[in-house]
Image: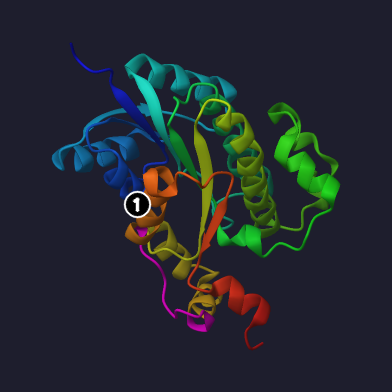
Amino acid sequence: MKDVTKVVVLIGTGSIGQAIARRISAGKHVLLADIKIENANAAAKTLSEAGFEVSTTVVDVASKESVDELTSTAVSIGKVVGLIHAAGVSPSQATPETILKVDLYGTALVLEAFGNVIEQGGAGVVISSQSGHRLPALSIEEDKALAINPVEEILSLPFLQLNNIKDSLHAYQLSKRGNSLRVRAEAVRWGKRGARINAISPGIIITPLAKDELSGPRGDSYRKMINNSAVGRPGTPDEVGVVAAMLMGQDGAFITGSDILMDGGVTASYFYGEK
């Protein structure tokens, strides 16, 4: 009798997501989902040539209908035991409105949808950002709202209205703080299914997107962050993959609802380094 297929869902098929998938998906089916099918297909070629069983689909994380369809597709393949949510847009890529819709609302949608189907013993990881750790403290009420407000009401919160958002970076910081808080709250719900969910907040990781940022208008600030950091260099997708594999595997079995900051000391330097 054939074993039931175990499914790992990767949303956002860039370098970091692939690095994680390679570490946790041996013997499992990897469902690759991206807003651009060509990205998913490129990742599928790489992973399938490395021996992984894969399939691809399109998803728009800012659409409930699309996320629900992705969830149904995953369940139709087998038992969902892993979720890697690595989709998002950066401050240089999008308007505040789009960032809030994709990075904040989209992540909440994904966590809710897959929290309804994740199998006992399953685990997930959300790729957040160091930016959420540099946002000044919010009020207790604002933190709670980001953590537990119904998904469809998040973007209606007064402090998230565009007249209260300074720029795209501010929207990004709020979104990533929201990701951390949402993961903490969702860990309670996922725990009732015997599953775990955590976040990782990477610093500057060398990916095609980071290279674009380094050569763009924010390049000087990026290089300053790297040079002033405790480690003095950017990170690699493989380094994020190592941490994610620990969080999603047995070595991380006592970790859930956490947000691991791995930025080479950029945030430490921001608060406590030389000015």
Q: Answer with the quarter of the image where residue 155 lies.
A: top right
Residue at horizontal 43%, vertical 31%?
A: 121
Residue 10, given in percent of the width and then of the height, sits at: 39, 37
Q: Residue 230 lies in magenta, yes or no?
A: yes
Residue closest to the far top: 1
Residue at horizontal 44%, vertical 16%?
A: 72
Residue at horizontal 47%, vertical 26%?
A: 118
Residue 194, given in percent of the width and then of the height, sits at: 50, 29
Residue 141, given in percent of the width and then of the height, sits at: 85, 45
Give the answer, above or below, for where 115 lies relative to 95: above
Residue at horizontal 45%, vertical 29%?
A: 59
Give the answer, above or below, for where 228 lies relative to 127: below
Dominant SS in magenta: loop
- Does residue 270 appear to the left or right of 244 in the view shown? right
Residue 95 vs residue 3, the one in the foreground: 3
Residue 260 vs residue 226, the one in the foreground: 260
Residue 26 vs residue 95, the one in the foreground: 26
Q: Residue 106 lies in magenta, yes or no?
A: no
Q: What amino acid type is highlighted by mark number 1?
A: Ser
**Number of residue marks:** 1
Q: Which residues are magenta?
A: 227-237
Circle 1: element type: helix
- Does residue 1 appear to the left or right of 98 in the view shown? left
- Looking at the rendered image, the quarter that the C terminus falls into is bottom right
Task: Please rate how many residues cluster around mark 1, counting C-alpha atoms within 10 Å: few if below 14, some from 14 to 19, many from 20.
Answer: many
Kindly tell me whether residue 76 is visible in this rendering: yes
- Looking at the rendered image, the quarter that the N terminus falls into is top left
Residue closest to the far bottom: 274
Give the answer, above or below, for where 94 lies relative to 149: below
The residue tagged 1 is 15
Residue 85, given in percent of the width and then of the height, sits at: 47, 40
